[in-house]
Image (cartoon, rainbow, N blue to C red):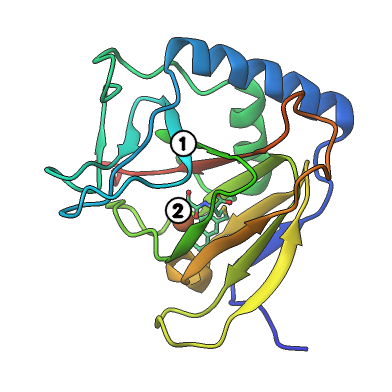
Amino acid sequence: MKAFPDGFRHLPAYLDIEQQRALVEDIRAVVLAAPLYIPEMPRTGKPMSVRMTNCGTLGWVTDRERGYRYQTTHPVTGTPWPPIPQQLMTIWREVADADVEPEACLVNFYDDTARMGLHQDKDEQDLSAPVVSVSLGDTCLFRIGGTARNDPTQSFRLNSGDVVVLGGRSRLAFHGVDRIFPGTSPLLKNGGRINLTMRRVNRTA
Ligand code: MD3
Ligand code: FE
């Protein structure tokens, strides 16, 4: 049994079912204000299989021409992102062990066939704050390795209500989502999986 990278914490069933339902309602409101869109890979323009939107003062976006970046407005509607729901801010305060607030919350929606390839999250200027992830809906098979792409990886399931904190040395670990297990949660009427990741982007002055 290999240890996880230092700073990695998996909090299974952190949210009870009522908290999960309330959070889904919050995210429905976010998606009404800021619709899910299909992101494109830099340079190739290849569409990602995960649909995305954001809440917070900044959102993570990507397209063929301008690549990965944070911006204050939705790439399709041009309007500012809606605020991060209070329940999410509370989770951050409880688990992040950071004296800063998150600026961005990326909302990822996975249907039964969506995947996310192994990658690092390094588009943030402030890499000292953790990333806090909340999973809702169907279970996924998540994979995490080390800070080099070829480091050995470990796989495990993330279930609805789980929270993961990626701080310390795990902040720059390679990670991805290999598959979704359809029909494993009754939370979302039409199935699928939502992942919410709160991030600090800018260093404080
Ligand atoms: C490990 N999302 O949005 S969440 C992403 O389930 C992303 O949607 C996945 O990777 C998802 O960038 C994984 C867990 C997670 C999030 C951020 C990390 C793991 C991480 C940052 C560094 C290391
Ligand atoms: Fe990531």
Look at label 2 and name its amino acid. Ala
Tag in front: 1 or 2: 1
> How far apart are the alpha carbons under marks 1 and 2?
25 Å
> In the rendered image, which quarter is residue 81 located in?
top left
From the top left corner, tell me how far across and down residue 38 is, in percent: 37, 35
Question: Is residue 5 shown above or below 202?
Answer: below
N-terminal of the pair, mark 1 or mark 2, is: 1
Q: Quadrant of residue 78?
A: top left
Q: Residue at x 81, y 37 (%)?
A: 15
Q: Residues within 10 Å of mark 1 (few under 14, many from 20)?
A: some
Q: Tag 2, which secondary structure?
A: loop
Question: Residue visible at 27% across and 20% down?
Answer: 76
| Residue in the foreground of this view, choosing between 126 and 45 | 45
**Viewer-proximal residue among 6 and 34:** 34
Instruction: Tell me the tag on residue 29.
Output: none
- Position of 143 relative to 60 (above/below): below
Q: Is residue 70 left or right of residue 152?
A: left
Q: Position of residue 71 (x, y in %)?
A: 24, 32
The correct choice, above or below, for 101 with respect to 73 in the image is below
Which residue appears farthest toward the left when viewing the image? 65
Q: Secondary structure at mark 1?
A: strand
Q: Position of residue 199 (x, y in %)?
A: 45, 44
Check disc 1 and give the amino acid type.
Arg
Query: Would you name the residue on which mark 1 appears?
Result: 51
Q: Which residue is depicted at the point 47% across and 71% down?
A: 173
Quarter of the image that includes the C terminus: top left
Which residue does the numbered mark 2 point to in the structure image?
Answer: 129
